[in-house]
Image (cartoon, helix red, strand yellow):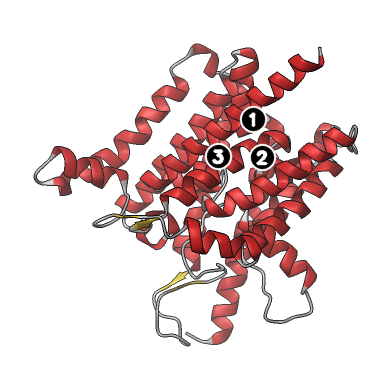
Amino acid sequence: MEEINLSSIQSIVLWATFAVGLAFGAISHRTHFCTMGAIADVVNFGDWNRMRMWLLAIAVATLGLQGLSITGHANLNDTIFLNSQWSWLSGIVGGLLFGAGMVLASGCGSKTLIRLGAGNLKALMVFAIMGIAAYMTLKGVFGVFRANHLDPVRFEFSSSPYLPELLANLFSQEPAGLIPILAIALPVILLIMALGSKSAWNKEVIVGGAGVGLTIVAAWWVVFQVAYIPEHPDTLEAAYLGTYANRAEGFSFVAPYAYTLEWLMFFSDVTRVLTVGVVACFGVILGATANALMEKSFRWETFQGVEDTANHTVGAVMMGVGGVLALGCTVGQGLSGVSTLSLASFVALGSIVVGALGALKYQMWRVERMV
């Protein structure tokens, strides 16, 4: 394959991912899709609608990706989520940190981009601090601690933490035929959970959940069907063009923060190139901006005081560190990761929820003390 063709394919990958990011940002802003908000609605008001929206997004994303896998259009083993070596301590600690951090910072990684696109200057500071903290955890001082003390605590799977395979091996002597059935049955159960209540059947829940879920599937499809080449002419190995680690990458908004800051700061360095994670960040921001302008809801917003600033600062650091440790955020693990049906992703997502619940209880305690 000629070099010019590789460049053309990579350009298509980046533009397609940017377009999917635009859709993700616009849909999320219009429907108020937010994982932290979903958890807070349940805890504070007993309102499950945004939680059902989130479950619907997971179900649609999982059904879509598993369908691509079963039909041979996606190789799930090329993702980071089905690694046979599971650093479970990093995943749990990172999830707890990220969950608590997103409450303090008023939203997760994707919500920060959406708020930034709608004119929230607090989100701009969260973006910068979170990106720096993520980079420090990837390659800096926090990264040394991660590599020496957290990542080595791991569990070795005989094949991979693919949930249908684990369950099939547990329940059947001949699991091969059971695996694809479970791969569809598990997201169908999530779909029933999401739409099992009459209150879930409203426009915002359906559009938000199904729309966000489909953007996750679309991002996977671009990577597996457009970015993948079976033999790179330079390495003679399979490659995923436009990705950072040459592996199949779904939407995630933690490490891409770090790479976006790196690309902006080292723009003149030709070795720093755009990747799907970076263009997805730009797409989400601009998608939210476009929808905010259409709805005439765009407005500048800043901090209310010292405590508000401190909460967002601490929350941004916790999300940057925690998201790298957990290998993703509420989108990276909660949607992209869970859609692979990786047991590790479900554990990381559960840890994020527990961390968020703890931070919400802390905020309620702070309010009660001030009364």
Give me the residue at 24% from left, 47% from top. Answer: 165
The residue where tag 3 is placed is 96
The residue where tag 2 is placed is 101
- Residue 282 placed where, x, y %? 72, 55
In space, the residues marked 2 and 3 are separated at their CA atoms by 8 Å
In space, the residues marked 2 and 1 are separated at their CA atoms by 8 Å
- Confirm or deny contact between disc 2 and disc 1 (CB under 8 A): yes
In space, the residues marked 3 and 1 are separated at their CA atoms by 10 Å
In the rendered image, which quarter contains the C terminus? top right
Give me the residue at 43% from left, 40% from top. Answer: 347
The residue where tag 1 is placed is 359
Crowd class of label 3 (few under 14; some 14 to 19; many from 20; radius 10 Å):
many
Image side of residue 320 versus residue 177, left or right: right
Q: Identify the image quadrant of residue 186.
A: top left
Do we see residue 91 in this rendering? yes
Q: Identify the image quadrant of residue 339.
A: top left
Amino acid carrying mark 1 in the image = Ala
> Camera-side residue: 330 or 59?
330
Q: Earlier in the sequence, mark 2 or mark 1?
A: 2
Q: Which mark is residue 192?
A: none
- The local secondary structure at tag 3 comes to helix
- Residue 184 placed where, x, y %? 31, 38
Q: Earlier in the sequence, mark 3 or mark 1?
A: 3
- Residue 369 placed where, x, y %? 77, 16
Amino acid carrying mark 2 in the image = Gly
Amino acid carrying mark 3 in the image = Leu
> Camera-side residue: 271 or 148?
148
- The local secondary structure at tag 1 comes to helix
Q: Is residue 207 above or below residue 179?
A: above
- Residue 350 placed where, x, y %? 47, 35
- The local secondary structure at tag 2 comes to helix
Q: Is residue 76 above or below residue 61?
A: below
